[in-house]
Amino acid sequence: MSFKAVLFDLDGTLLNTIEDLAVSTNTVLKKHGFPIHDTESYKYFVGSGIISLIRKALPEAYAGDEKMLERCRREMEEHYSAHWADRTVTYEGIPELLDALTSRKIKISILSNKPDHLARL
């Protein structure tokens, strides 16, 4: 079988980003006096973009508050931009896999629902 290209998701496929996402979101929640969540909980909050993540992390009474969601999104992106690599690691074997694909001249593309400027970091 011959492949011309391989597409990857970024978070949870190439990179284990869950801890940095949890810390950044918890930092924003704490700032507003909201309860925070353990890292394990964030595994159920991620996967549908940052607004969905924040909506799930916020107390239920605020999950529909669009102003609060937007405010928390901005603050979370700001914190995450500065701390995205504090705890983020590649999954075992990923660098070798990418090197092998590159050496075979197979094109690689990465898709993400993460905002583009954060995905590029």
Image (tube, grey):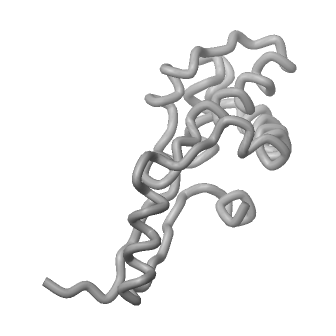
Residue closer to the observer: 107 or 26: 107
- x and y percent of residue 52 in the render? 56, 40
Image quarter of the C terminus: bottom right
Q: Nearer the viewer, residue 107 or 9?
A: 107
Q: How many marks?
A: 0
Residue drawn at 82 percent across, 44 percent down: 74
Q: Quadrant of the N terminus?
A: bottom left
- Asked if residue 33 lies left or right of residue 98, the reply is right
At x 71%, y 27%, the residue is 23
Residue 95: percent from left, percent from top: 49, 61
The reply, left or right, for residue 119 in relation to residue 48 is right
Q: Is residue 80 above or below residue 14?
A: above
The part of the image, by quadrant, that contains residue 37 is: top right
Task: Decide if residue 2 is on the left or right side of residue 52.
Answer: left
Res. 59 image quadrant: top right
Residue at point 44% right, 81% down? 102
Q: Is residue 15 above or below residue 72?
A: below
- Left-right relation of 26 to 113: right
Q: Quadrant of residue 70?
A: top right
Nearest to the observer: residue 82 or residue 65: 82
Which residue is at a point 72% across and 23% down the rendered structure image?
26
